[in-house]
Amino acid sequence: RAWGTEGLRAWGFGKVSGVGSAAADLKTGPVDASQIEVLRDMRSQRGLPEHLAIIMDGNRRYARARGLPDRLGHVKGKERLEELVRLVLVEAGIKYLTVYALSVDNLTKRDHTEVSQLVELIATGLEQLACHPDISRNRITVRVAGALDHLPARLQDAAALARKQTERYGGEGGVLTICLAYDGRREILRAAQQLAIDLQNGVLSEAELTEEALGERLYTYGLPDPDMVIRTSGERRVSNFLLWQVNQDPGACSSTLISRCSLPL
């Protein structure tokens, strides 16, 4: 299935607009029991997506539009992601949330100082997730997907900690997947290479070279394909994100800004 702006309104994401500020303006606020009950009712009647994927984009533009350093834009984006985890996995009860936080291009093509700041920010965030009471209370499993061996040691260690501390929950309360050093084309190439090796070594027969076999060798193995992709900057492109997994129907990638997409709180 694919959801666009109207679909977002239909399953209860409040006011939706194609224009507005960056991800840092995501609405926040207290939640009372009646509002949660309304949300659950909408979920049962209209059906929320099982798997929501988000391309985190627009933090630098948000900062520059306000005369702020790029670093503060990334800090705001991190804060809003934390709120989004609560809204999507806890209040809405969506089972899977996958976010594209750091691409291979981000690591290799951006200014060294900015990359260092991003690495430290993300590593700190992963360490906080590993011991966050909301994560443990709601039994949310944290996964990190991508070419992790390409990450700085600081980030590899933080990713391993978050995974180790939360894997015991078995995704009971939801699964948060953070894509780091991720590249959709390289993911598919890597899976195809592993298929070729397994075929050569007799692990697989030619008859077993199927879509399912390739899917088992992707970074996202074990996750259902996303029902909806949102790019927070409002642009309609997937930027090498989940190329195998995403429905290529034009309506599947919403142009809605996450800043104008809030649960009815």
Image: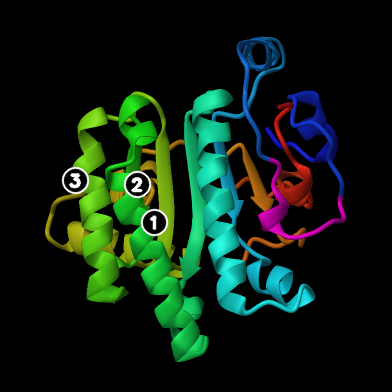
Residue type, mark 1 in image: Gly
**Which numbered disc, 3 or 1, marks the residue that appears first in the sequence?**
1
Q: Say which mark, if any, is on residue 129.
A: 2
Residue 62 spot, x, y in % from top left: 72, 68
Q: Residue at x 48, y 29 (%)?
A: 95
Residue type, mark 3 in image: Lys
Q: Mark 3, residues whose alpha carbon is within 10 Å: few (<14), some, or many (≥20)?
A: some
Q: In the image, is residue 24 part of the stretch drawn in magenta?
A: yes
Q: Quadrant for residue 168, please give it.
A: top left
| Towards the viewer: 143 or 209 | 143
Q: In the image, is residue 26 part of the stretch drawn in magenta?
A: yes
Residue 177 spot, x, y in % from top left: 41, 47
For the residues bearing labels 1 and 2, Cβ distance under 8 angstroms: yes
Instruction: Report which residue position mark 1 lands on.
Output: 125
Q: Say which mark, if any, is on residue 164.
A: 3
Between the C-alphas of marks 3 and 1, the distance is: 15 Å
Between the C-alphas of marks 1 and 2, the distance is: 6 Å
Q: Say which mark, if any, is on residue 108.
A: none
For the residues bearing labels 2 and 3, Cβ distance under 8 angstroms: no
Quarter of the image with the N terminus in it:
top right
| Towards the viewer: 123 or 57 | 123
Secondary element at tag 1: helix
Residue type, mark 2 in image: Leu
Vertical comparison of 212 with 113: above or below: above
Look at the image and give the residue range highlighted in magenta: 18-27
For discs 2 and 3, the disc positioned in front in the rendered view: 2
